[in-house]
Amino acid sequence: MKILVVGKGGREHALVRALGEAPGAPELFCFPGSDAILRMAKPVEADGLEGLISWMVENGVDLCVAGEESYLVKGEGLANLCKKAGIPCWGPPRESAQLEASKAFAKAFLERHGIPTGKAVTVGHADEARAAIDGVYPVVLKFDGLAAGKGVAVCQKAEEAEAFLDEVLVQRRFGPGDLLVEECLTGPEVSIFAAVVDDRYLVFTPARDYKRLGDGDEGPNTGGMGAVASRQLVSAELMQVIDESIIAPTIAGLAKDGLPYRGFLYFGLMLTPDGPKVIEYNCRFGDPECQAVMPLVHGDLASFCLAGAKGEFAPELLKFDEGWSVCVVLASAGYPETSRSGDVIQGIDAAGRVDHAGTRLNASGEWETHGGRVLAVVAGAAGRAEAVAKAHAAADRISFDGMQRRRDIGLLHFEAS
Ligand code: AMP
Ligand code: GLY
């Protein structure tokens, strides 16, 4: 089986690794990939999305797996083009991927299908935003488009809201687009992943992402500084509530709205005092949650995704570990505002399972930083405390100039357990 994974980050590193572990040893390709991914997968000689599709047809690719969201909504859309070319694609078409690409679309979908979520209004100008905020803080402001995890601000006071309004609606940091002014919800967050095949779905191991840069959830939001995954994160009773009030109505809503879906669907939830509510949908696996979840997935992920992409639901191909998996992200100097490339990384080989997110090989054959999030160090164990200790000890073996890392991944938000 020939599988092509689209993307280049830590999530794709973990996906390529997991797909490659499938029985039958599939032949793996990655586009655009990274130096590290291309040690496990072969490179693809293609330019742009159309070129990629032609390459897949010419090379007899059996399955295209969408890792990164941007390709799903680029041009005609990765899955749409795959469909035209007759290539099974694990990832939804452009129209369904609006659930992630447009927060206003997602909010309207949630409201239309009666799925619990924070109240919100969509505005186009700073004055409308001020009127919608109406002096009530904290408030959440969300740019209505893809912004690599940086388009959301939880504002405690007016100055923070003003700074974000200026950045997004005046300076247009993320380009054109509206803004959602959303009710601020409180409670622990949990990321739920469903592998959706039309009207059926399999829920993967839940995870918790640590989005803030600093220990104690201080500092700016990032793409994610670490993650913890375990079935024990969510009790069976709570999972039933999530399934009945959120996952099942979402899958039914997609069908009602005529939105086809085959691929991973990520539910970003907040466990509020009034029950679980959706804060976002993503039309792909989480990053860095994927790096934490994949070691817990056993069986034949490659055949599961191939069957799913063809409309066959085959949950019997997968099983999930009961244990805990912890992923610690190491980020470069300046992240998340900027990132620094070219810092030589020491100790990767001594750290066990490491997924590369932003690295490259320099002329001397050493790994160096090449992006904001650089590495994800992953370790697992039967219990949380042991998995946490192992992951942090492994991360301690790696160093580079300007390295930023959290020390409380897997500890914060578990004080009571
Ligand atoms: P999003 O990109 O929508 O997941 O937002 C990024 C982060 O902002 C989330 O993981 C939450 O920590 C926070 N956030 C988003 N929406 C809300 C909300 N309505 N209330 C409180 N925090 C939120
Ligand atoms: N970890 C958050 C995300 O993948 O969007």
Image (spheres, grey):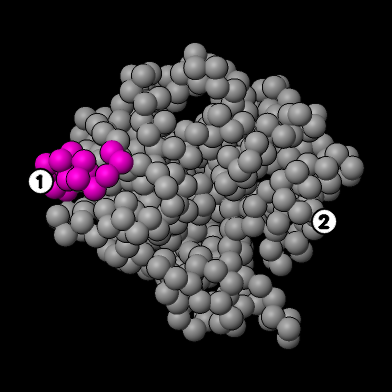
Q: Residue at x 42, y 19 (%)?
A: 249
Q: Residue 94 falls in which quadrant of the image?
A: top right
Is residue 304 something that shows in the picture? Answer: no
Q: Kindly identify the residue that appears in the image at 48 percent across and 40 percent down.
A: 101
The alpha-carbon separation of the residues under discs 2 and 1 comes to: 54 Å
**x and y percentages locating residue 149 in the rendered image:** 43, 52
**Which residue occupies the foreground of this view, 184 or 208?**
184
Outermost residue toward the top in this view: 256
Residue 112 drawn in magenta: no
The image shows residue 68, relative to residue 32, as above or below, that is: above
Residue type at mark 2 is Glu
- Which stretch appears magenta? 123-138
x, y percentage for residue 275? 26, 30
Instruction: Give SS at disc 2.
Output: loop
* x 89%, y 44%: residue: 59
Q: Which residue is mark 2?
A: 45
Residue at the image point whose x is 42% and y is 74% from the top: 334
SS class of the residue under badge 1?
loop
Measured as percent of width and height from the top left, residue 87 is found at 78, 33
Looking at this view, is 327 or 365 the one in front?
365
Q: Amino acid at mark 1?
A: Gly
Describe residue 124's horizontal placement relative to residue 263 as left or right.
Answer: left
Does residue 255 appear anywhere in the picture?
A: yes
Q: Quadrant of the N terminus?
A: top right
Mark earlier in primary sequence (2, 1): 2
Residue denoted by label 1: 135
Badge 1 crowding class, 10 Å Cα cut-off, few under 14, some 14 to 19, many 20 or more, is few
Give the image quarter of residue 415.
bottom left
Q: Which mark is residue 298?
A: none
Up/down of 352 relative to 168, above or below: below
